[in-house]
Amino acid sequence: MSNTEALQWAAEADDSLTRNEILTDDKIIRKITAEDDDDVTPVNPVKISHSEAVAALNTSLQCAEDQNFEAHEIMLLSRLRDRTFELKIGTAAQKKITDFFGH
């Protein structure tokens, strides 16, 4: 490699370094999340009732059992269903008359 070629190569390498910003982990994360934000369109969240959630989890549980999922996966779905059912019961509990009066 001649001196001229070596100098040209060094100049190209310097140009490459100045074009390519050296990023820290934080900068990389900010850059990626900023790019992700551009792709996302805001969506109005859909409210799902406890009854619908329990029905969906029952269906998922039945499917998992039919497909011979591993025991820990079936147990997780079962626990999620049971917890959702508890929330359903808790919100459907009859209110006391004292709940309507200030304390």
Image (cartoon, rainbow, N blue to C red):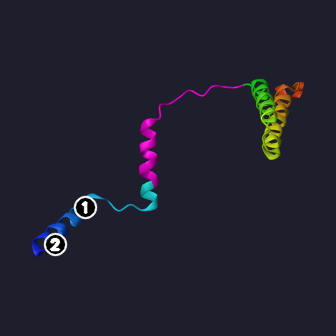
Which residue is disc 2 drawn over? Answer: 6
In magenta, the rendered stretch is 29-48
Q: In which quarter of the image is the C terminus?
A: top right
Look at label 1 and name its amino acid.
Answer: Ser
Q: In which quarter of the image is residue 51?
A: top right
Q: Is residue 23 magenta?
A: no
Q: In which quarter of the image is residue 100?
A: top right
Q: Which amino acid does label 2 sit on?
A: Ala
Query: Relative to 82, is 16 on the left or the right?
Result: left
SS label for mark 2: helix
- Circle nearer the N terminus (2, 1): 2
Which residue extends farthest bottom? Answer: 3
Vertical side of 92 occupied by 5: above or below = below
Using the rendered view, name the quadrant where residue 89 is placed: top right
Residue depicted at x 56% and y 26%: 44
Can you identify the residue that label 1 sits on? Answer: 16
* 43 in magenta: yes
